[in-house]
Image (cartoon, grey):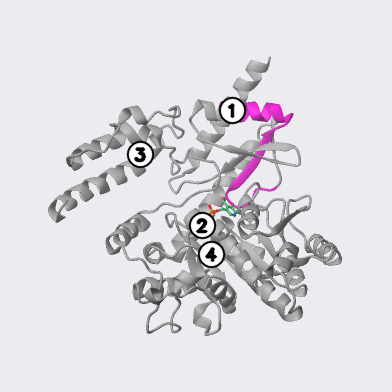
Amino acid sequence: MEAPEFKDFAKEMVDYIANYLENIRDRRVLPSVEPGYLRPLIPSEAPQRPESWEDVMADIERVIMPGVTHWHSPKFHAYFPTANSYPAIVADMLCGAIACIGFSWIASPACTELEVVMLDWLGKMIGLPEEFLACSGGKGGGVIQGTASEATLVALLGAKAKKLQQVKAEHPDWDDSVIIPKLVGYCSKQAHSSVERAGLLGGVKLRSIEADNDNRLKGEVLEAAIKKDLADGLIPFYAVVTLGTTSTCAFDYLDECGPVGNKYDVWIHVDAAYAGSAFICPEYRHFMKGMETADSFNFNPHKWMLVNFDCSAMWLKDPSWVINAFNVDPLYLKHDQQGSAPDYRHWQIPLGRRFRALKLWFVLRLYGIENLQAHIRRHCGFATQFGELCASDSRFEIYGDINMGLVCFRLKGSNDLNEALLKKINGRGNIHLVPSKIKETYFLRMAVCSRFTVSEDMEFSWNEVKASANEVFAEKN
Ligand code: PLP
C-alpha cells in the first residue's frame, strides 16, 4: 500500500471510528455469539494475492463487530473503565507512524524525553510528593508501564534486589538460596490478583492479610503480620497498599501502612490503578495521605483518564533499585550518552517499548486539566445517581460505600438470588455487569465506564436492573 491509498483507507477508517463511537449506545453491549463463531466467517488460510482495503473495511461489520463487547458503551458497567478519547486515538496513529522502539535514550530521544516530562506533569497534577518527580533534581522519576500488573511486579523485583543487598551486607555468608525463601511480601485480601501473581513470578512468598470491615487494610494489621514473620525468622521486604480496590474501590490506610513499612524497612508500593486518576481532583487527594512514605506509586491513565490502553504511570523514589535489578548491558545497546538520561529498558520487563507518552501529551493538552477533572466528577455523580435510584427500591441494598464511579449493590436476600439477578441482567444483553464476593457475600458491581454516559443512561441501566429483578421474582413465584 502506498501513500495515496493509505490516505483513502485511513480517512475511511476515521469516519468509521467516529460513527462507531458516536452511535455505540445503539449496539447490543454484550455480543450474543458462541465460542468459535469467527472461524467459519473467514477463509482458512491467508490470501496469496493482496485484497482491497474496501473488502477489509466491509468485513469489520461482518466478522468483527458481532463478537465485540462494547467497552465504551454507556451500557457497559463491568470491571473498571478502560479509557478512550479521540486525542489518544490520533496520538496512537502517530505512534504507529514513528514506530520507534524507545528502549534507550538514543533509540529515540523524543520518546524518552517526552515520557520523563509527561510523568512530571502528571505527578504534579495529582500532587505527588516532589521526591517522585524527575524535575526535583533528586533520584526520583516516572515511567510508563504497560499495565498496573507490570508496575507491581517491577516494584516487587526492585524491593527484592534491595533487600537481598541489605541482608547480604549483614550476613556475608548467606547467598540468594538462603535469603529468597525467607522473603515475604504483604497485601490485603482485597488487593488485585496481579499482586499474588507478582509474588509467584518473583519467586517469593506473598501474604494476603485481612482488611477491616470496610475492606481497608489497617497499619496495625500489617505491623502484626510483619512482627510475626520476623519472630519466625522470615524477612519482610515488600507491601502493596491499594488505593481503590477492585471489588469495592476501598482505600487502604496509606497513612498507617506507609510508616509501618518505613519502620521495618519494607518497600511500600501503592497500587491506585483505577482510583489514581481521581487524584487530579483536590477533593479526592485525602486518600493519598502518607504518600511520602511510599517507595513506588502507580495508576492507570488508561483506566479513567481518557488515555487509551496501554498507559500505566509509575513513579519510583529511587529507581536505581529497579534499574540495577534488571541491568544487563550488551554492547549493541550501549550508547555514548548513557547515564545522562534514563534508558527505560532498565525500568521494565521487556526491552521494546512504544512511544506511549504521545497519547498522554495529546490528551493533557487537548482536554486540559479542567476537562479531565470534569470527566472524573461526572462519573462520580453518575454513581451517586445510580445509588439513589437503587436506594429508592426497598428490594435492594447498597453494599458498603459508594466510592468514586463504582456502586456495589445486591438484592436483599441470598447469594443465589443475586446470582440469578446477574445472570438475568447479562442474559438480556442490554447492559453488562460483573459480580464480586467478599466474606461469603455476593454482590453486583455497577461501574460507570463510558465517556459518553449521560444521566438518562444511568436511568436506563437502573431500569434494566429493576426489570431483571422483576423477572427473577416472577420466575421464583
Ligand atoms: N490493581 C487494581 C486495584 C485493579 O483494579 C486492576 C484492574 O482492574 C489492576 C491492578 C490490574 O490492572 P492492569 O490490567 O493494568 O494490570
Sequence order check: which comes first, mark 1 or mark 3? 3
Amino acid type at circle 4 is: Ile
In this orientation, which residue lies closer to the viewer: 366 or 209? 209
Residue 244: percent from left, percent from top: 63, 55
Q: Residue at x 43, y 46 (%)?
A: 452
Whether residue 409 is visible, yes or no, is yes
Q: Is 467 drawn above or below residue 461 in the view shown?
A: above
Look at the numbered disc 3 and give the secondary structure of its residue.
Answer: loop
Residue behind label 3 places its C-beta within 8 angstroms of ligand 1: no
Q: Which residue is mark 1?
A: 423
Q: Please name which of the two marks, 1 or 4, marks the residue nearer to the observer.
A: 1
Sequence order check: which comes first, mark 3 or mark 2? 3
The stretch drawn in magenta includes residue 282: no
Sequence order check: which comes first, mark 4 or mark 3? 3
Residue 288: percent from left, percent from top: 64, 66
In the rendered structure, which segment of residues is drawn in magenta?
401-424
The stretch drawn in magenta includes residue 408: yes
Q: Are marks 1 and 4 in contact (CB under 8 Å)?
A: no
Sequence order check: which comes first, mark 1 or mark 4? 4
In this orientation, which residue lies closer to the viewer: 344 or 139? 344
Count of marks placed on residues:
4
